[in-house]
Image (cartoon, rainbow, N blue to C red):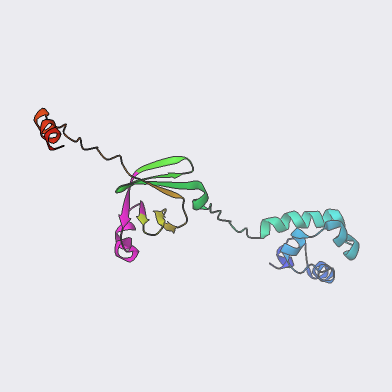
Amino acid sequence: MELKSIKGIGIVYEKKLNEAGIETAEDLVLADLKEVSERTGISVNRLREWKKKGRKVIPRKKAIVREDVAKIATIEITDSAAKVTIKGVPHENIPVYRGRFEDVRAEMVKREMAVHLGTKATLWFNQQWYENVPYSVKSRPQKEEKVPERSFFEKLKEWWRK
């Protein structure tokens, strides 16, 4: 942004600031005012005033901070459902898709959250894919089939065979 966009800076002051290495309003906002004052002969108070005005004139960029989901999430897979914990908040009964990723991808993106389990777990969340999320696969305990106890007659038969 040009220095002229700051109220109070005209052609004369712009020339002095350019000679001191200040080309834009951003340069003025970031500059050491005492050093610029010594180079240009412009008072520090006037430079400070221009710096304040320059901050208002310069458009601010919004930073989008994205957290690394791999560091704040875990996946616990049990059969066809998963429990996904993100920032300590558990999301239960999340569907788990298996098979070729290309085959199940279209079905997964229709959901708010889904997990694909291939060679590694891939998480679909917040309209984005996340890989390298720590996961564990837990199998539900199988009901043990009780072996029927042998009857007295079967035990007796076995004893006679010996």
What is the span of residues highlighted in magenta in the rendered image? 93-115
The residue drawn where x is 72% and y is 58% is: 54
Quarter of the image with the C terminus is top left
Q: Position of residue 104 (x, y in %)?
A: 30, 61
Judging depth in this view, the residue of 161 and 27 nearest the camera is 161
Q: Is residue 105 magenta?
A: yes
Q: Is residue 145 depicted above or below 132 in this figure?
A: above
The residue drawn where x is 78% and y is 54% is: 49
Q: Position of residue 152 (x, y in %)?
A: 11, 28
> Is 149 left or right of 83, judged from the image as shown?
left
> Is 12 left or right of 78, judged from the image as shown?
right
Q: Position of residue 18 (x, y in %)?
A: 81, 70
Report which quarter residue 59 is drawn in: bottom right
Q: Is residue 156 depicted above or below 68 in this figure?
A: above
Report which quarter residue 160 is drawn in: top left
Judging depth in this view, the residue of 54 and 102 nearest the camera is 102
Residue 119 visible to an observer of this rendering? yes
Judging depth in this view, the residue of 54 and 138 nearest the camera is 138
> Is 29 left or right of 139, judged from the image as shown?
right
Q: Is residue 9 magenta?
A: no
Q: Is residue 4 depicted above or below 139 in this figure?
A: below
Report which quarter residue 139 is drawn in: top left
